[in-house]
Amino acid sequence: MISKKSKYAIHALVHLFKNATSENPIPTHTIAEETHVPVKFLETILRELKQAGVTASKKGKDGGYFLQKPAQEIHIAEILRVLDGPIALIPCVSYRYYQKCDECVNEATCGVKRAFLDIRAQTVELMKNYTLDKLIDSPPL
Amino acid sequence: MISKKSKYAIHALVHLFKNATSENPIPTHTIAEETHVPVKFLETILRELKQAGVTASKKGKDGGYFLQKPAQEIHIAEILRVLDGPIALIPCVSYRYYQKCDECVNEATCGVKRAFLDIRAQTVELMKNYTLDKLIDSPPL
DNA sequence: ATATTTCCTATCAATTTAGTAGGAATTAAA
DNA sequence: TTTAATTCCTACTAAATTGATAGGAAATAT
């Protein structure tokens, strides 16, 4: 399971994609109401995403948030990495957060590592495919 | 990331596959030494796996654990489900542990749900492929 | 009998998760 | 120049989860 933080973030970002522009930023409380996310929590989420280069903001009255880059360049893998950390399922197959596992004797030949390396690679490919623009709701019947 | 519990379990199960039979069960402390897992922790893990139908045991002297079914029928998805819960990344796309998400207005058309449904399905396929027999170490050069 | 094992229940410390509180700084507009 | 609305920042906290450990009861081979 991903954290609620990440789930909230994804919904919020889709909302920004649909409604916000740099000329028309959306304030946190509006997004919070629409997506049913606690407003103070969402505030910290959007700020974290800003620091990671995903969202941008305008301060003061009539301020709010918008996307810092095209929705086609923001995907689920990136969002999860920012808020939940590595995609890898075990530390020894993470690129950025690599940590040795004590369980395998020889990392070069470890079968468990080999499997999880493959799983990570394929999962990342899967998640990279889901960019924000592919997450909008289907048209109702 | 998966829990250490699950990671330990996978290594232990591979060890059982390589070394144990119903006539030659392996005691917990032996597996613990070989796989560098705390023995008391491993004890509870192997018992949980037994209750889930993955391992079997023989009590008393010369007792220990062995696999309850062929290694080709035990895969990573099953192990993770037993010890870590659902494979699904958000509650509303889990089959066994379904829970409604408050963020989407209409579950039938929710784009986020659609994406994570696909991700879950593909991840399960991936993980089902990795049965215990495919997790043995590659031959050293 | 004895040694060795699984089995069971309970407990625990550390970490992570999911927030909340309170206010400073910034900005648009009246 | 005041006011309202917003982002931004730091700190705090309660609850849940994780990663174990403790102490022994029950079973079994020799």
Image (tube, coloured by chain):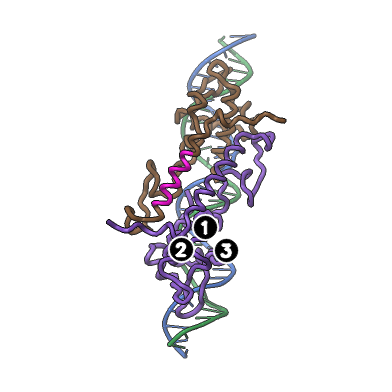
Chain colours: A brown, B purple, C blue, D green
Q: Are marks 2 and 3 on the same chain?
A: yes
Name which residue type carries label 1.
Ile
The amino acid marked with disc number 2 is Leu
Q: Nearer the viewer, residue C26 or B110?
A: B110
Labels 3 and 1 positioned on one and the same chain: yes
Q: Which residue is mark 1?
A: B79
Magenta stretch: dominant secondary structure: helix
Q: Position of residue A18 (x, y in %)?
A: 60, 24
Query: Can residue A33 be seen here?
Result: no
Instruction: Mark 1 and mark 2 in contact? Answer it, CB < 8 Å.
Output: yes
The front one of D3 and C1 is C1
| Upstream in sequence: badge 3 or badge 1 | 3
Q: Which residue is mark 3?
A: B52
Alpha carbon of mark 1 to alpha carbon of mark 2: how far?
A: 10 Å
Precedes in sequence: disc 1 or disc 2: 2
In this rendering, the answer to whether A138 lies above or below B41 is: above
Q: Which residues are magenta?
A: A114-125
Secondary structure of the residue carrying numbered label 3: loop
Task: State whether residue B28 appears in this view.
Answer: yes
CA distance for labels 3 and 1:
9 Å
Provide the chain ID for the residue under circle 1.
B
Q: CA distance from mark 2 to mark 3?
A: 13 Å
SS state under label 2: helix
Q: Which residue is mark 2?
A: B13
Q: Secondary structure at mark 1?
A: helix
* Chain letter of disc 3 in the image: B
Question: Are the residues tagged 2 and 3 within 8 Å (C-beta)?
Answer: no
Q: Which percent across, then down, holds residue B71?
A: 48, 63
Position of A95 with respect to D27 (left or right) is: left
Picture layout, residue B116 above or below residue B18: above
